[in-house]
């Protein structure tokens, strides 16, 4: 595939994704974060598969870095989701 076409696709899809995320109401952010955590789990499986199939050392290093970034994304997503859900818990009255 032509590299210029691939860069153009990346730019277009990035702009479309930004536009979609920008128009999401604040009420839906928590469910979307949970869904994105599940999607990041799929990204980890893809990165692990690509890393396992890599032949060259440079490709394995990039695959390991992709796994690390996907795991960081999942941990951050769960942290943000946890903080948002804590806002809905009832506070205990101190006596």
Image (cartoon, rainbow, N blue to C red):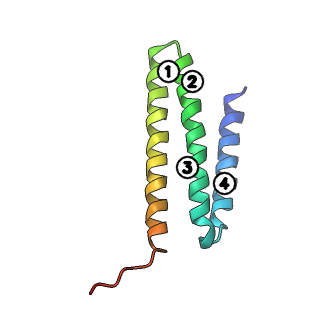
Q: Name the N-terminal-most of marks 4 and 2.
A: 4
Residue placed under numbered mark 1 in the picture? 59
| Callout 2: SS | helix
Name which residue lies at 57% across and 24% down: 49
Q: CA distance from mark 1 to mark 4?
A: 28 Å
Nearer the observer: mark 4 or 3; the answer is 3
Residue placed under numbered mark 3 in the picture? 37
The quarter holding residue 50 reads top right
Residue placed under numbered mark 2 in the picture? 50
| Marks 3,1: beta carbons within 8 A | no
Nearer the observer: mark 3 or 2; the answer is 3
| Marks 4,2: beta carbons within 8 A | no
Q: Nearer the viewer, residue 69 or 80?
A: 80
| Marks 4,3: beta carbons within 8 A | no
Q: CA distance from mark 3 to mark 1?
A: 25 Å
Q: Position of residue 40 (x, y in %)?
A: 56, 43
Q: Name the N-terminal-most of marks 3 and 1.
A: 3
Q: Name the N-terminal-most of marks 3 and 2.
A: 3
Q: CA distance from mark 2 to mark 1?
A: 9 Å
Left or right: 52 with respect to 2? left
Q: Which mark is residue 17?
A: 4
Q: CA distance from mark 4 to mark 2?
A: 25 Å
Q: Name the N-terminal-most of marks 1 and 4.
A: 4
Residue at the extreme left of the image, as rendered: 95
Which corner quadrant holds the C terminus? Answer: bottom left
| Callout 1: SS | helix
């Amino acid at each position: 595939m032509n590299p210029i076409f691939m860069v153009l696709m990346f730019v277009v899809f990035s702009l479309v994704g930004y536009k979609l995320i920008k128009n999401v109401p604040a009420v839906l952010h928590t469910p979307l974060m949970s869904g994105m955590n599940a999607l990041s789990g799929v990204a980890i499986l893809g990165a692990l598969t690509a890393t396992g199939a890599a032949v060259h050392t440079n490709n394995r290093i990039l695959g390991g870095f992709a796994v690390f970034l996907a795991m960081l994304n999942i941990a951050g997503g769960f942290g943000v989701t946890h903080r948002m859900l804590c806002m809905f818990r009832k506070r205990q009255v101190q006596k």
